[in-house]
Each structure stands twice: as C-alpha cells, then as structure tokens.
Amino acid sequence: MREKLNESKAAQVGLVAVLAVLVAVLFLGKGGGSSSGGEPEVAIEAGETLAVAAPTGMGELPSSVPQTRPLPHRFSAAYDADETVALLVVHDGGIDDKYTKLALKAVAKVEDVTPIIVPSKQISRYASITVGLDVNQLPALIVLRPKSLSHGVPQASVAYGYQTPQSIYQSIVDASYRGPEGGAYHPG
C-alpha cells in the first residue's frame, strides 16, 4: 500500500482530500461552528472580553427590585446628602480587585464623593442597586449620580475589571456632570 501511495499521484491527492474532510468534520463537529446559526464561539468570547473591560453606561435603577432590608446607612446618607457614591464590590484575593481598591482610595479625596468598598460576601446588602444594574462580575465599580441630578430616579453606571485612578475619576465626573445633555458636539 505504501508503494502504491508513493507511485500514484491520484492516490496521494485522494488521501489528502480524505484527511482534509476528516479534519474538517472533527473540528466543526466539536463546536468549532455554531449549530444555531449565530456567531462562532471565538467571536462570542471576544465580545465577552470587551464587555468586561467596557462600562455598560448610565442606567436607571428599577423601582420594582424587592428589598428585604434597607441599604446601609453610610450609602443612604451619602445619597441623601446629594453626593456622588462610588461603590466598589471586590472579591478579596483578586489582583485586579486589589489595584482597583487602591485606585479608588487615591481618588477618594474628591469633594462630594463617598467611596464605599464592599467585599463580595456583603453584596446582598446592596441588592437593590446591584440587581438593578445586573452586576455579574467583580470587581464592579458602581457610580451613583447625586440625588439632585437624577430627578428622583436613582441612576448609576457600572464598570467591570481593573480601573485606574483616572478612569474612576472620569466616572465620577461623568456622574456629577451638571451641563446640558444631548447637545450636538462640534469640535474645534
């Protein structure tokens, strides 16, 4: 058989074609493609990676989230005092959690901002905030707009993963912005 393959070009081409079909069936049959007609798994993973690094933007917190107990006093007092609240939920032991915690402490001196660091074990104390924003990764930086700027409807943004002091500061500036909204941008 070996001699026949060595001597015949048609046999060689046929064997290569059979092997190519087998490889294609093995890779596509094990999930390399999508049977539901959606995007391949690689694109989904890339999208998830981007979602981790990108903030989800500003959103209103729903009023229908069941709350078994009131929010902690420090959080409620800061919101009622019309301050921007920077709530950081961390998982102890994570390197990105550690550095984001340090970054928040560096920005903590900003006026009218209350930084609150919450271990993941205590996230249930903030359920009316975290459930409303669908917090699903840690570390999670939640920045709540001051009460006077949200017109009675609490609004917050959430950013996942490592945050620098500059990105935290920008989130705080964005949350406390008091200028016109929705205007057209005209550079220069």
Image (cartoon, grey):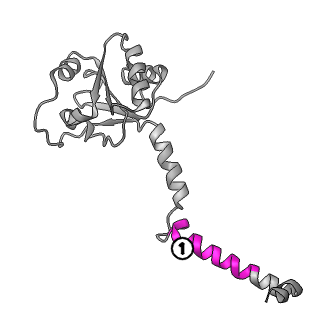
Residue 42 location in percent, x, y?
55, 56
Task: Report the magenta residues as a range.
Answer: 16-34
Q: Does 102 sit above or below residue 54?
A: above
- Give left or right: position of 166 versus 149: right
Residue at coordinates 58% horizontally, 70% vertically from top-left? 27
Residue 94 location in percent, x, y?
39, 33
Q: Number of marks in the image? A: 1
Q: Does 158 sit above or below residue 134?
A: above
Q: Which residue is mark 1?
A: 29
Q: Is residue 8 magenta?
A: no
Residue at coordinates 43% horizontally, 30% vertically from top-left? 95
- Residue lying farthest left? 69
| Predominant secondary structure, magenta span | helix
Residue 187 location in percent, x, y?
61, 24
| Label 1 neighbour load within 10 Å: few <14, some 14-19, many 20+ | few
Location of residue 169 (image quadrant): top left
Q: Does 163 sit above or below residue 13?
A: above
- Give left or right: position of 152 versus 55: left
